[in-house]
Amino acid sequence: MAEIFVRDLVFVWNIALIQPDLKTQKSECRLTKEHNLEWTVKLAPGEQRELVVKWTAEYPAQEVKYSSQKFLVGNNRKF
């Protein structure tokens, strides 16, 4: 079994995190004081997991943008 560590920066300004829901979901993900999302995932040999991040951001002129990111970890993949 391997332990994989994934980090993604969450900007401070007007960002609303949609997924993962850090308040209600019991997950391997946490938000650090430096505004990084961090996962520690244990994977069996050959196992892979998808880590999804969804968020909205306010831009000037009160426009709202939406973004989604997926991280595929495991199965000897390189980032």
Image (cartoon, rainbow, N blue to C red):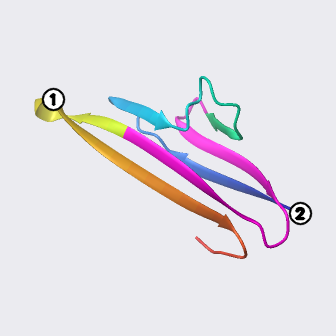
Identity of the residue drawn at 30% across and 36% down:
57
- Checking the image for residue 1, the label placed there is 2
Q: Position of residue 61 (x, y in %)?
A: 10, 31
Q: Position of residue 14 (x, y in %)?
A: 32, 29
Q: Amino acid at mark 2?
A: Met
Identity of the residue drawn at 34% across and 37% down:
56
The reply to whether the C-beta atoms of the residues labelled 1 and 2 are less than 8 Å apart is no
> Looking at the image, which residue sits at the far left?
61
Q: Position of residue 33 (x, y in %)?
A: 58, 29
Magenta region, residue range: 32-55
> Considering only vertical position in the picture, is 46 above or below 22?
below
Q: Is residue 43 left or right of residue 28?
A: right
Quadrant into which the N terminus falls: bottom right
Quote the CA–CA distance across marks 1 and 2: 46 Å
Q: Quadrant of residue 27?
A: top right
> Looking at the image, which residue sits at the far top?
23
Q: Quadrant of residue 62?
A: top left
Q: Is residue 60 left or right of residue 3?
A: left
- Checking the image for residue 15, the label placed there is none
> Which residue was labeled with disc 1?
62
Q: Position of residue 58 (x, y in %)?
A: 25, 33
> Considering only vertical position in the picture, is 54 above or below 73?
above
Q: Is residue 64 left or right of residue 24?
A: left
Camera-side residue of 8 and 48: 48
Badge 1 crowding class, 10 Å Cα cut-off, few under 14, some 14 to 19, many 20 or more, is few
Q: Amino acid at mark 1?
A: Gln
Badge 2 crowding class, 10 Å Cα cut-off, few under 14, some 14 to 19, many 20 or more, is few
36 is within the stretch colored magenta:
yes
Q: Earlier in the sequence, mark 1 or mark 2?
A: 2
Local secondary structure at mark 1 = helix
Local secondary structure at mark 2 = loop
